[in-house]
Amino acid sequence: MSRSPVFGSPLFLGFDHLEQMLDRVQKSSDGYPPYNIEQIAADRLRITLAVAGFAMDDLQITQEDNQLVIRGRQKDDADGRIFLHRGIAARQFQRAFVIAEGIEIEGAWLDNGLLHVELRRPQPEVRVRTIQINGRTRPMVDGEA
């Protein structure tokens, strides 16, 4: 089943890379681990992931271009232990978030099985540029003679 492109309108020019990012994120989301995204101030966000059983050494946070990628891989500590029931599995995960241009990752901390990642979104300055309208001649493009 194909879906209609989000940015398929001719009014959206140059947004095809965003469509590819959305497809990539949609394919990588399996629901584990659960997470929250909070707006904690006008220019601040916090992502919180439930990572019970993971130690700091089991977690990795990277920024890959415009993606925040959080990976978890627990070491199997079952050596010599006999489980009558094992409902808490050492499951690895990768969770990716697409972040907008200019968002800064300020830090992360682990507290009571919750991994918190702080993000700051600087307020963009408004830019207005006046474009000169020429007469009947079109402007020269680089490389034209």
Image (cartoon, rainbow, N blue to C red):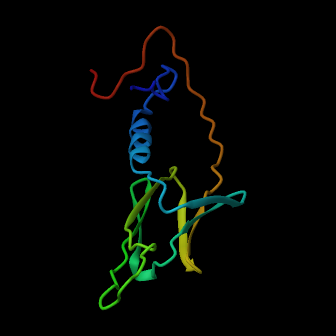
Comparing 24 with 118, the one in front is 24
Residue with the most extreme right position: 41
In the image, residue 98 above or below residue 36: above
From the viewer's side, name the closer residue of 129 and 10. 10
Residue 82 is situated, as x and y percent measured from the top left of the image, at: 35, 87
In the rendered image, which quarter is residue 130 located in? top right
Task: Look at the image and tell me in which quarter the N terminus lies.
Answer: top left
Q: How many marks?
A: 0
Identify the image quadrant of residue 115.
bottom right
Name the quarter where the C terminus is drawn: top left
Residue 6 x, y percent position in the rendering: 49, 29
Residue that sits furthest to the top in the current view: 136
Q: Residue at x 64, y 48 (%)?
A: 125
Please, is residue 79 above or below residue 106 in the view?
below
- Residue found 37% across the figure and 22% down from its top: 140
- x, y percentage for residue 87? 45, 72
Residue at 48 percent of width and 79 percent of height:
53
Depth check, front residue: 92 or 59: 92
Q: Which residue lies at the image location 37% right of the left edge and 77% below the top edge?
A: 74
Between 27 and 133, the residue placed more toward the observer is 27
Residue 107 coordinates in the image, percent (x, y): 54, 73
Instruction: Give the residue furthest to the bottom.
Output: 80
- Left or right of 82? Residue 131 is right
